Image (cartoon, rainbow, N blue to C red):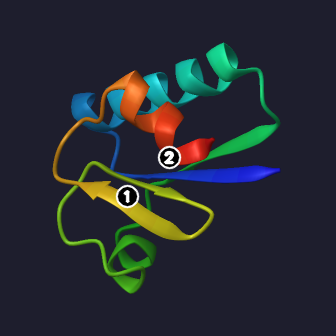
Amino acid sequence: MKKIEIFGIGCPKCKETTKRAEQAVRELGIDAEVVKIEDVQRIIDRGVIVTPALAVDGEVKVAGKIPGVEEVKAWIQ
């Protein structure tokens, strides 16, 4: 199972990133867990400086922008 982490403190951009990640998982029909990380210290500990950020299986794929659904699909396939 893939693990997708969304880093952000709950801002509109972070919520949109979560929505797009969930949409990508649905459209691909894969088994994946989407986890929101909102604790600032945990975000910093992972090396994320700007949010929103998205990681797949522990690897940060994007930070500081909202990824497109197609981008997320490519990362999780």
Q: Residue at x 32, y 81 (%)?
A: 47
Q: Is residue 53 above or below residue 41?
A: above
At 64% from the left edge and 14% from the top edge, which residue is drawn? Answer: 27
Whole-percent x, y for residue 41 in the image: 38, 78
Q: Are marks 1 and 2 in contact (CB under 8 Å)?
A: yes
User: SS of the residue at dot 1?
Assistant: strand
Image coordinates of residue 40 in percent, x first then y, are 35, 69
Q: Is residue 35 left or right of residue 53?
A: right
Residue 21 screen position, x and y as percent: 50, 31
Q: Is residue 30 left or right of residue 60?
A: right
Mark 2 residue element: helix
Q: Is residue 60 above or below residue 35?
A: below
* Circle 2: residue type: Trp
Is residue 35 placed above or below 26 in the rendered structure? below
* Pointer 1 local density, CA inside 10 Å: few below 14, some 14–19, many at least 20: some
Q: Where does label 2 land, which residue?
A: 75
**Amino acid at the residue labelled 1:** Lys
The image position of residue 68, as x and y in percent, is 31, 27
From the image, which quarter does the C terminus lie in?
top right
Label number found at residue 61: 1
Taking 59 as reference, is 25 left or right? Answer: right
Q: In percent of the image, x 82 and y 36: which residue is there?
A: 31
